[in-house]
Amino acid sequence: MEHNLAVGLDIGTTKIVAMIGRKNEYGKVEILGIGKSKSLGVHRGVVNNITQTIQSIQQAVLEAETAADIKIEDVTVGIAGQHIRSLQHSDYITRTNSETVIDDDDIDRLINQVHKLVMLPGEEIIHVLPQEYKVDGQAEIKEPIGMYGGRLEANFHVVVGQVSSIRNIGRCVQSAGLNLEGITLEPLASANAVLSQEEKEAGVALIDIGGGTTDLAIFRDGIIRHTAVIPFGGNVITEDIKEGCSIIEKQAELLKIKFGSAWPGENKDNEIVSIPGLRGREPKEITLKNLSKIIHARVVEIVEQVYVEIKNYGHEEQKKKLIAGIVLTGGGSQLKHLKQLVEYITGMDTRIGYPNEHLAGDSDDDITSPLFATAVGLVLDGLKRQERKKVEQQESVVNDAETTSVEDLKEEPVKERRSFLDKLTERVKDFLDNAE
């Protein structure tokens, strides 16, 4: 596979999407091919049938390969699911020599210390995200590198998940004949695709309503502050329609997409949809008002749970206020009048998020649909990872030729710290290699 290409693989509860993208000369991302298959074997974001998931992955990948006429080898995968939880944690290190300035190694030492936190059995830390640092008691430091100090402490946002679930995803990807290039938390991927830098600075909550889960990511001052996965999504709405109207799932899903609305007030009592009955039975008549009442009840429940999480983050404190409000994305965000309902429940400004923040201007409308927010985010993540690799390779070349003058070094891009996810990816790979 070429170097400036990346593939995002979004293993969702309702669909699996493989998306191939590359950076064009303007630094924007062009989507070259996209493949989509029905996701069988995933429940609430967690793989529960390996064989079926492998088949669905292969189908999506084949479709994307055909569309782009490119062979896919490496993929960046998202993890979500009901097993993800997050916590806040503070930690500190005492530096042996306060005569030297704080450098990357100090920060790595601090982050590694957080990884020693004791988790529940079977849980692992997926992400450790430093919020802000304190040096010798001086608070609110964004970047401590280059400062003098004896005690370095930080508040961390720690995301935790189940090892087995992550390994299962790795297993599916590998068995589908692909190489796991990176793992990313899905709410973070969607956020990258949909949110602007200004929104992240001002304070914003991204709500990604998928089929099986609803993911939340909260940003403020450009830093991720809170993540949560709520184990409900579009599927429970369909399920409720199916039960409430005594119809089969396929019909319930169509009803939801074509006629569904989250706001019962606007349907007249006499608007009726007729649904063909099962073999030889009478058709069923369903009023749109009833349909939207069923949807409304469930959507209110989902939004209220998300709002509890937003309050847990501390949105009601003045200095934590989310000025940019809420951005809704994911397939579930396409429900009619959802924006109004969310604004009504939370009292926060709301918009629907399309993943066109970093895409080339001439991208197809169907690619910039909220449905593909996570996939686009995973492609972005894969591209970023490759750029990091390139920089590291260049650096090792530079280090071999240690004759560079100081002038040349000024242009060096800042090397990003290796995220824990890179390490996690390696661990999952090792595990899979040894498990065979």
Image (cartoon, rainbow, N blue to C red):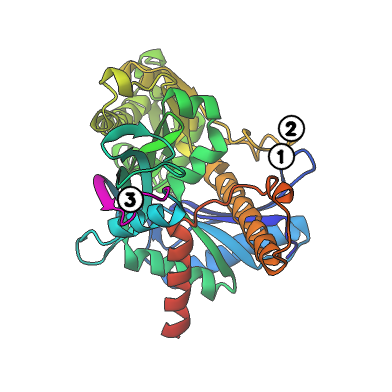
The residue that label 3 is drawn on is 159
Q: Out of 233 and 82, give the one closest to the viewer.
A: 82
Residue 89 coordinates in the image, percent (x, y): 24, 46
Say which amino acid is labelled 1: Lys
Position of the C terminus, as image quadrant, is bottom left
**Residue 214 falls left or right of residue 184:** left
Front disc: 1 or 2: 1
> What is the C-alpha distance between the residues marked 3 and 2?
34 Å
Separation (CA) of disc 1 from disc 2: 8 Å
Location of the N terminus (image quadrant): bottom right
Asked if disc 1 and disc 2 are in contact, CB closer than 8 Å, the reply is: yes
User: Residue 288: which disc?
Assistant: none
> Does 108 appear in magenta?
no
Disc 3 or 1, which lies upstream in sequence? Answer: 1
Count neighbours of disc 2 (C-alpha within 10 A) and say few if under 14, some if 14 to 19, many if 20 or more: few
Query: In this figure, what is the number of numbered marks?
Result: 3
Residue 56, image quadrant = bottom right
- Residue at image position (42%, 77%) is 431
Q: Nearer the viewer, mark 3 or mark 2?
A: 3
Q: Which residue is mark 1?
A: 28
Q: Looking at the rendering, which quadrant does residue 322 occupy?
A: top left
Residue 197: give x, y in percent of width and height. Answer: 54, 29
* Percent position of residue 48, x then y: 36, 65
Q: Are marks 3 and 1 in contact (CB under 8 Å)?
A: no
Element type where label 1 sits in the image? loop
Mark 1 neighbour class, 10 Å CA radius: few under 14, some 14 to 19, many 20 or more? some
Which element is circle 2 on? loop
Q: Position of residue 74 (x, y in %)?
A: 62, 65
Residue assigned mark 2: 361
| Magenta region, residue range | 88-101
Which residue does the image show at 31% across and 49% down from the upper left? 158
